[in-house]
Image (spheres, rainbow, N blue to C red):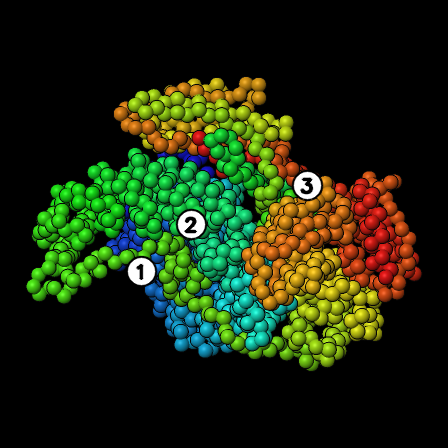
Amino acid sequence: MIHSLFLINSSGDIFLEKHWKSVVSRSVCDYFFEAQERATEAENVPPVIPTPHHYLLSVYRHKIFFVAVIQTEVPPLFVIEFLHRVVDTFQDYFGVCSEPVIKDNVVVVYEVLEEMLDNGFPLATESNILKELIKPPTILRTVVNTITGSTNVGDQLPTGQLSVVPWRRTGVKYTNNEAYFDVIEEIDAIIDKSGSTITAEIQGVIDACVKLTGMPDLTLSFMNPRLLDDVSFHPCVRFKRWESERILSFIPPDGNFRLLSYHVSAQNLVAIPVYVKHNISFRDSSSLGRFEITVGPKQTMGKTIEGVTVTSQLPRGVLNMSLVPSQGAHTFDPVTKMLSWDVGKINPQKLPSLKGTMSLQAGASKPDENPTINLQFKIQQLAISGLKVNRLDMYGEKYKPFKGIKYMTKAGKFQVRT
Amino acid sequence: MQRFLQLPGAAVRPGGREADQEAASPVLAPEGGAPPWYQALQPEELRWLQAPEEDTTPEESLEGPCPEPGQGQSQSQPLRHDDLKAMLDTNKDSLKLEAMKRIVAMIARGKNASDLFPAVVKNVACKNIEVKKLVYVYLVRYAEEQQDLALLSISTFQRGLKDPNQLIRASALRVLSSIRVPIIVPIMMLAIKEAASDMSPYVRKTAAHAIPKLYSLDSDQKDQLIEVIEKLLADKTTLVAGSVVMAFEEVCPERIDLIHKNYRKLCNLLIDVEEWGQVVIISMLTRYARTQFLSPTQNESLLEENSEKAFYGSEEDEAKGPGSEEAASTALPTRKPYVMDPDHRLLLRNTKPLLQSRSAAVVMAVAQLYFHLAPKAEVGVIAKALVRLLRSHSEVQYVVLQNVATMSIKRRVSTGPRPALVVQQGMFEPYLKSFYIRSTDPTQIKILKLEVLTNLANETNIPTVLREFQTYIRSMDKDFVAATIQAIGRCATNIGRVRDTCLNGLVQLLSNRDELVVAESVVVIKKLLQMQPAQHGEIIKHLAKLTDNIQVPMARASILWLIGEYCEHVPRIAPDVLRKMAKSFTAEEDIVKLQVINLAAKLYLTNSKQTKLLTQYVLSLAKYDQNYDIRDRARFTRQLIVPSEQGGALSRHAKKLFLAPKPAPVLESSFKDRDHFQLGSLSHLLNAKATGYQELPDWPEEAPDPSVRNVEVPEWTKCSNREKRKEKEKPFYSDSEGESGPTESADSDPESESESESKSSSESGSGESSSESDNEDQEEDEEKGRSSESEQSEEEGKKKKMKKRKKVPEGQEGGSSSDEGSDSSSSSSESEMTSETEEEQVEPASWRKKTPPSSKSAPAAKEVSLLDLEDFTPPSVQPVSPPTVVSTSLAADLEGLTLTDSPLVPSLLSPVSGAGRQELLHRVAGEGLAVDYTFSRQPFSGDPHMVSVHIHFSNSSDTPIKGLHVGTPKLPPGISIQEFPEIESLAPGESTTVVMGINFCDSTQAANFQLCTQTRQFYVSIQPPVGELMAPVFLSENEFKKEQAKLTGMNEITEKLTLPDTCRSDHIVVQKVTATANLGRVPCGTSDEYRFAGRTLTSGSLVLLTLDARPTGAAQLTVNSEKMVIGTMLVKDVVQALTQ
């Protein structure tokens, strides 16, 4: 299966290597570098690169390439999924996954990788188990270790792996028992020039942070479960129960995890909470272009739209822009031609707008494409699909936990074509 | 490192020095700043600096030369490693740990630390667990290079293998097997064998992992390893399953025979195996199924005709049209109907829930399994899950899109040229918009999405697709624009209707400012023009003008070729183009030069008067070209076209050679031929066979003996011949066998067990064609089965709580399988029995033994909460009509996944179809055309307010009936009809089914319309039973009560009735009610109350039905509905159904 793993930073240095079978020379990465060069942009590097004796499968996250070397046929998604799991684990352990952090914690990283794969086949990938095997570094623990000389490696061998609930640690204890669920929905949409919706769909997730003592058995039910069209579960969810009663019943992992992700059926009309009025025009034979955007609320169910940012990749012909925002701050990078405007909250009384001119390359003909506008926004306390959690019950433990549900709507891939 | 940051500045300095040394290393970033490796270590070092006794060693290390040993150079830096050695030799664990950490950091960076081997290996028995682990890491890394020294550590592991702690045993085995030293092969073999029979499943799992390691070290051990694999395959724990199958795949994938006995167990365990194991098992089972079962599609055409089609087809299949049925009717007498092997079905059923997995790899694995193994009608379920993956990381998208591209094209190819079969490829069509391209997608994703969009384009959606493409053409990403133009070209070739539109669009692009766009357009236009050159003289002229401006060689070459090929359409321009080209000949690219020669030759042959000299000029230029291809071509052409004494024989045919009509090119997807690779595999992705790729075998002609999968009956049951069912009980105990199997272990295993049980029994029934005599045997067996089950149930007793959860799904499973088997009643009784077991474990097992085994009395047993079981049983009052069964089995299979009303998926809550076939037009009255109709109870895809009605035409006359369509309907106000597409022709003896939608506007008024053929018109009318005017809704008990409370008074209709003896069991009651009305069952707490809920189709008002049945037979029926008329009629119908 997975032979070796190389971590490569954006400047092309291999800063970590790990082999699970016999050693593969790092020169194999030269093929990768070649492909990287050809692709010009990092995200265009093909995820699978065949070389004469090996295959290189890579993922690109946090500006790091995780390149797995395999020698024989294996489903590519198997490897890619695993690599993403590795990144998630690092993130879970160190808060961020970046080159300096990995270098700082190289020993922990190595120990974790050692546990995750045995002979190239995934062994322990659940973060709860891993954390029992190798404790994540914290400031406190580092200090304690320095003084007492104890180590990051769990002195008890983990039992989680043997249990039938492999995702949960045993013997969890908390003084404050609490369970939080965040229902986060993202709207993916493409809006065309005239403001009509070409495609819009809602993708939601329920992220949970559960800190409960013992072995609690939770059930979560929805007011309107039929909204959920396509769901995928954390392995802890009992599928049969969902199928028959539309109730989520599970013994939760300890800590943060993604309980469920869902898709709201495309048949339901998606409420689009914002609109963008735009007037972007280039004139032939003139070195100036007009640029005007206004963002306004629409179907927000009475909630405020916050955290609005507008980004747009302008055509190469644009040399510079002189714009005046009615609120927020904007930047334009003349090299990458990326305009970004941090709007903040939308005040329905006074709609934010960004107006001004673009200076174009003199003599060049007008670009044939108007730029696409990408929108980011957040709406608190609202799940745009209307999904509502009905109740959360706990069985199997005696104490009364604190329960909290939060709703949020965000823009996913929200694009306005101009 | 946080600690480090707090240290005073002076202490940091050694780090700076390190950095200078490190700068020499090519591996590290040259820009300044201390490399973090050392930062990580320094605090410790600093601590020693403060501790006088350790003072020297770390200092030394800091003063050592550049720590870049390189291969073989390590001896030159003794100093640096000496300090590590010294640290390893101390008694202090903290020092050892520090040394090990530094060594591991070196390994991580890819530096050679092999010369430390002796010092490190000594610490293999260190007490400190972290040191030990790091030593293991080191050992595994370098043991191969230092084999002799590595042997020193072996005894430690051998001791570990005997440790009472399972985790230590496992870890010892893990490291021992990872040391790649050939001498210890026998020791490893021994250790693996021993561990394979360890009592701890975790150790057994480790043993499974060790197998491929040993195999790669010494392949001579294969035979012995296969024995171990065989043994571990029989293991019943989920922990081991994934690992051992992985070992199987690496060591002996060809020994498919080892799987037989474990096949069903693997299928049943699958859902509980961890994600990685699931992927491996699924892809192995795909291969297995391809060798063991018959193709579900082989007799597909046959299925249409035969009643058996019901199981696997859908109405889409039926809509295939007359062509296939012709084939079917000829095939009918010769081939026996295809019946899916129950084991095949088991696999499909048990993998389906995994489409909901969070792991993309698992979803993909299931998708490919369905793609390769499922009957066509069922493959559609994977589309939604695959589309979901498109939200994931771009790498995942990349792989998924590649596979979707293949799948979408495959569907097209398989459907062939018959346009009626468009439905077949429709798997992804509802998701067309999910493949729309965003400007932020990476180019490689854009191009793949484009590929999929092109594959999905068809007559109906092409306008939308082209409009999308139009946006794409204006993109800034030029590679993507080029790909879009090609895509337009492909759409134009595939869909004749839009060819001209596309061509015009492309011609417009010729005036684009970007040369790449123009060039790409020219190339595509050239291909399109080849299809119908005569009409496009203008375009060719336009292209000819472009030669002045366009510089892209491929485009120039294309234009020249076009002009040459169609020079008779542009007789005036062609010679002029040649003149210009002759002028610039020397400056052209090779590919253009070749085309110039071609053009010259063609013109010479057609218009030698004007071009003779030009041609000779071009040929002479070419003669002295640098490229030998061009020289060669020139010589060859000259010989051919210019008549000379000796070359006469050929030149007579020159016209034929040069001006032969050329077939139009086919613009095809590059994914066309990829489907011979197993989808989701690396080989498929690369379109080349990867090392170790296992070919996906073709379906066998004849199914191998299915009995090989039977497993011997456990001794404690007396049942002898029904192993199929019996062996399913084994996995049931599997998990509780493990060392630590507390509460959860029973959770899922029993489910699968009982599922498969009811399943296999019913399906084997159908497999044996379920003749009467067979039935008797079966019943006998059933009884045996039951008795053994009840034994089992006693053991299950304590797990009551866990089991409750499973009741309902099990019921569904049992029910759906009963549809497949014709022996439905016995199977449903079977599953009922199991569920009952859970419900009332107090009841002594003997009670059940007394239950008469006949299928009739079995349902009489009390059974409460099987949600849908009854729905699935074909109504006994009405004849079972084939198309109803189509929908039911399909629905049963699909329901696990979805809750939508999307057209692909029949409504899950009403899997039963309505009343049986009703006659619309009698054969005699219709002059040979007989028309029946059924209410399919599936949502009508066009309009949710419509009742979908399946209309079956059959032609019993001896002339074909042509032009069947619906004539002008005379409809009462409010009622509307969605007509079915015209049936062009119905050959004698053939029959076909179409779907039509009628909006009855919540009334039972008849819809009158005319059925027209080319010659006749028949007045017909469809009057719906009131029960068909609604669709089931899913309500919980509480919701039901809440709604019911709102609908009292006038809206409540109550009727008292006495239930006859024959219909006092839940089973029959529920079945009768659901057969009468299209309602969904609502779970209910009390045993003698039944609740059903539905909504009327047009107005969406709730219809709630409650039946309160006393054991004595007295019963009260209540219907609550806003629509009083409907309520009243419904009461009447239900009472009639129940009392008759």
Residue holding disc 2? B496
**Pointer 1 chain:** A
> What number is the disc on residue A52?
1
- Label 1 sits on what residue type? Pro
Q: Residue at x 75, y 42 (%)?
A: B1101
| Quarter of the rendering containing residue A72 | bottom left
Q: Residue at x 40, y 56 (%)?
A: B671
* Relative depth, front residue between B730 and B442: B442
Question: Badges 3 and 1: C-beta atoms under 8 Å apart?
Answer: no
| Quarter of the rendering containing residue B315 | bottom right
Measure the C-alpha gap from mark 3 to mark 2.
51 Å
Q: Residue at x 15, y 54 (%)?
A: B630
Secondary structure at numbered mark 1: loop
**Pointer 2 chain:** B
- Label 3 sits on what residue type? Val
Measure the C-alpha gap from mark 2 to mark 1.
43 Å
- Label 2 sits on what residue type? Gly
Q: Residue at x 53, y 76 (%)?
A: B702
Q: Residues within 10 Å of mark 2 (few under 14, many from 20)?
A: few
Q: Residues within 10 Å of mark 1 (few under 14, many from 20)?
A: few
Residue A303 place in picture, x, y as percent: 62, 28
Residue B461 place in picture, x, y as percent: 49, 45
| Dots 3 and 2 on the same chain | no
